[in-house]
């Protein structure tokens, strides 16, 4: 998120996987940094337990220890010897925030275990895998972690660019040419982080509804999480049409969102309308919330990030209780003259020229994310959600 102090340097606040593992004598903020993964927002460490990994084994046997050199990072050392970063941290009593200096000796195997010889290099062979989605995952991140294209993942799972994925869903990862040495599963050290959310309950999947005594088009539309206009259009009706018991009505798609996501999307739309935000601005808010929290009012996140937009109390976005108020956090995202935070933080309406920015640029101007391109895939779906719910 944007640094509330409005200083010359902007400090990211919704960075997914940006904890520094700096291995130099300089302060952490001044030394070269490498982003460390966060279990709920990045798939790199979790994928270490799958048949396809990004680690490259060393050509020689792994020694018992390694002396840190200037410019080294834990993840770079892990890759050098074909090890898992999380395991390397665990073996040396380190955490994701640890800073280690040149000259420090790192253990390259579990305490009491003999150093393992790196598997010999072999010619590439095709491999495929299955992956269970965790909170915060996106298709693009999963594809990058497995070294395949987004299009290949979508095609392998019968998905489109507008498809919604959710925690607990299993994806087939298409085969790619990877070294056979990298196909063996690597043990993963347990990470103490927020629990992964269970797969949410989906909205009703019915496509027709038989009218009952007392039903109204408004009531039916609310039941299925769609607009009155959408139901009228789907059935060739007008606002003056009469519906009667026993009549069967076609129910348009409820956008593919869960009941919880629909409620939060409607909240974002309602607040945007109240503030006079354009459809473009509301679409940006919807897409941002989907990327940050899967349109869920989360009580956890990267470091102290919480809520729909993963805003951080430590950077002035409000107290944890205030950010947990989905309506307030939405108003803070929009910002403008009616921002509950005043000028402490900067919302979308406070960004000069946001109307002429791309979808990603506008979202990034507010969020200041380490993954700015992650917002782009949500532009088209967000427009459809607004059309269906707004």
Image (spheres, rainbow, N blue to C red):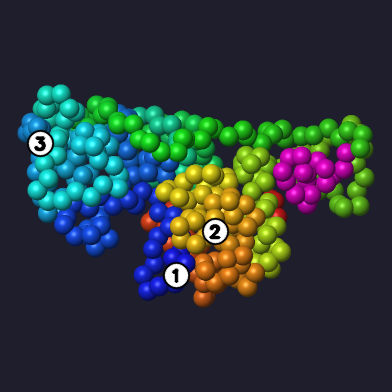
Task: Tell me, for residue 5, which label it has, or none.
Answer: 1
Q: Is residue 118 above or below residue 279?
A: above
The percent position of residue 323, horizontal first and vertical second, equals 57, 54
Name the residue beneath numbered marker 2.
318
Reading the image, the residue beneath label 3 is: 65
Q: Residues within 10 Å of mark 1 (few under 14, many from 20)?
A: some
Q: Was residue 73 drawn as part of the magenta stretch in this picture?
A: no
* Predominant secondary structure, magenta span: helix
Q: Of the residues under marks 3 and 2, which one precedes in the sequence?
A: 3
Task: Specify the quadrant of the image occupied by residue 106.
Answer: top left
Q: Is residue 265 left or right of residue 122?
A: right
| In the foreground, 338 or 83 | 338
Residue 82 seen in the current view: yes
Q: Is residue 262 left or right of residue 110?
A: right
Q: Residue at x 25, y 40 (%)?
A: 94
- Indicate which disc residue 57 carries: none
Horizontal arrangement in the rendering, residue 237 relative to residue 16 (left or right): right
Give the Cα separation between the discs numbered 2 and 1. 13 Å
**Between marks 3 and 1 in the image, the one whose residue lies nearer the viewer:** 1
The percent position of residue 166, horizontal first and vertical second, equals 52, 37
User: Do residues under tags 2 and 1 come within 8 Å of each other at their CB atoms?
Assistant: no
Percent of width and height locating residue 297: 58, 46
Q: Which residues are magenta?
A: 215-231
Measure the C-alpha gap from mark 3 to mark 2.
46 Å
203 over 328 or under it: above or below: above
């Amino acid at each position: 998120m944007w640094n509330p102090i409005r200083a010359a340097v902007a400090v990211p606040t919704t960075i997914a996987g940006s904890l520094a593992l700096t291995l130099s004598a300089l302060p952490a903020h001044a030394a070269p940094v490498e982003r460390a993964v966060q279990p709920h927002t990045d798939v790199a460490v979790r994928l270490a337990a799958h048949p396809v990994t990004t680690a490259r084994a060393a050509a020689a046997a792994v020694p018992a220890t390694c002396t840190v050199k200037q410019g080294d990072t834990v993840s770079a050392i892990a890759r050098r010897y074909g090890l898992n970063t999380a395991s390397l941290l665990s073996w040396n009593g380190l955490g994701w925030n640890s800073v280690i200096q040149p000259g420090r000796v790192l253990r390259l195997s579990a305490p009491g275990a003999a150093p393992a010889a790196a598997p010999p290099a072999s010619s590439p062979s095709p491999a495929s895998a299955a992956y269970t989605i965790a909170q915060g995952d996106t298709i693009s991140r999963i594809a990058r972690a497995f070294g395949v294209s987004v299009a290949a993942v979508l095609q392998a799972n019968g998905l489109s660019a507008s498809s919604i994925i959710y925690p607990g869903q299993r994806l087939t990862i298409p085969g790619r040419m990877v070294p056979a040495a990298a196909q063996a599963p690597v043990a993963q050290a347990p990470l103490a982080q927020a629990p992964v959310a269970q797969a949410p309950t989906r909205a009703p999947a019915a496509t027709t509804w038989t009218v009952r005594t007392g039903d109204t088009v408004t009531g039916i539309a609310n039941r299925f999480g769609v607009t009155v206009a959408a139901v009228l259009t789907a059935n060739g009706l007008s606002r003056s049409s009469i519906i009667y018991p026993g009549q069967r009505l076609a129910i348009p798609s409820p956008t593919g969102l869960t009941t919880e996501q629909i409620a939060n999307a409607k909240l974002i739309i309602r607040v945007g309308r109240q503030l006079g935000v354009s459809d473009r601005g509301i679409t940006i808010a919807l897409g941002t919330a989907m990327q940050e929290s899967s349109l869920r009012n989360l009580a956890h996140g990267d470091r102290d990030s919480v809520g729909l937009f993963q805003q951080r109390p430590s950077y002035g976005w409000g107290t944890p209780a205030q950010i947990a108020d989905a309506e307030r956090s939405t108003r803070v995202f929009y910002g403008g003259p009616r921002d509950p935070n005043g000028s402490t933080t900067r919302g979308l309406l406070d960004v000069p020229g946001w109307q002429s920015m791309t979808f990603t640029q506008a979202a990034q101007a507010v969020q200041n994310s380490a993954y700015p391109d992650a917002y782009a895939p949500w532009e088209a779906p967000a427009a459809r959600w607004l059309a269906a719910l707004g």
